[in-house]
Image: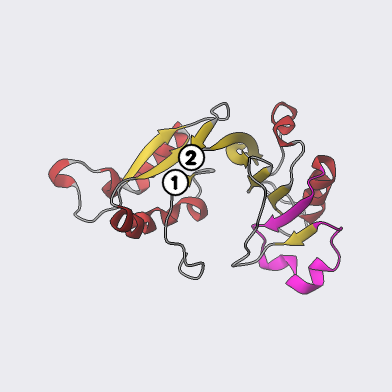
Amino acid sequence: MLAAGTQHLDAILMTHEHNDHVVGLDDVRPFNFKQGGEMPVFATEKVQKELKTRFAYVFAEGDKRYPGAPMVSLITIDKNTVFSIKGLSFLPVELMHGKLPILGFRVGDFAYLTDVHHIEATEIHKLQNLHTLVINALHHTEHYSHLNLNEALDLIHQLKPQHSYLTHMSHRMGKHAEINKTLPAGVELGYDGLQIRIPLP
C-alpha cells in the first residue's frame, strides 16, 4: 500500500478466512484515521465468525474496546449477493479451494479468483466474456487445493478472457522472465506493484 501510494480505501472484500488472506485486517487503522470512519468489510457469515475470533479486540465493545483498534463494519454476502461499492457492481463467484467453498469476485469485465482448485458448472457461467482475469497458479505439480500452472492455463483457455494474470505463485514456479516466455499470448505472471487498467461499466 505504501509503495503504491494508496491514499484512500473504499472497502475490503474477503475471499475466505485463511490467514494469508485476512491477517492484514489490522492495517486498516491508518485508513480509519485518515478517512474518519469504519471500513466496510464484505464477507460471508463463516468468514465473519473467524474474523471475530482472530481479531476479538477489533470487535470488542464498550470499555473492553482498545483505544485505536481498527474500526470495521461487517457486511454479509454470499455467492448470490450482488452488491455495489461507489457505483460499481460486484458479483461473487463461488470457487472450490480444495473442499472449502470460497469467493472470487467479478466487477464489470474483470474477475479476481484466488486459491481456486476448481469451479463448479453452476458458477462458471458467471465468468464469461471477461476482459481481464486474475487467477492463481501455484506451481507446476498437482496440489490438493490450488490450480497448478497447466490447470490454470486450461481454465483460461476455457474462459477465453482477453488477458490473464497469474497470482498466488510459489517459489517453485520458477523465475519470472523464464516462465513468462513459455506462456500463451495474453497470459502473464503477476508481480508486486503490477497495475492493471481495465474498462469499467
Range shown magenta: 160-186
Q: As shown in the figure, which amino acid type bears the numbered disc 2?
A: Ile
Query: Image height check: is 137 above or below 48?
Result: below
User: Residue at horizontal 77%, vertical 73%?
Assistant: 177
Q: Is residue 140 visible?
A: no
Position of the C terminus by quadrant: top right
Query: Image height check: is 150 above or below 178?
Result: above
Residue 184 percent location from the top left of the image: 86, 58
Q: Which residue is mark 2?
A: 85
Decide: marks 1, 2 in contact (CB < 8 A)? Answer: yes
The local secondary structure at tag 1 comes to loop
Residue 81 percent location from the top left of the image: 53, 28
Q: As shown in the figure, which amino acid type bears the numbered disc 1?
A: Ala
User: Residue at horizontal 74%, vertical 46%?
Assistant: 131
Q: Nearer the viewer, residue 119 or 188?
A: 188
User: Residue at horizontal 65%, vertical 38%?
Assistant: 96
Q: Which disc, if any, is residue 11?
A: 1
Residue 58 percent location from the top left of the image: 29, 48
Q: Is residue 21 magenta-colored?
A: no
Query: Image height check: is 185 above or below 55?
Result: below
Label whose residue precedes the other's in the sequence (1 or 2): 1
Q: Is residue 136 visible?
A: yes
Q: Which disc, if any, is residue 67?
A: none
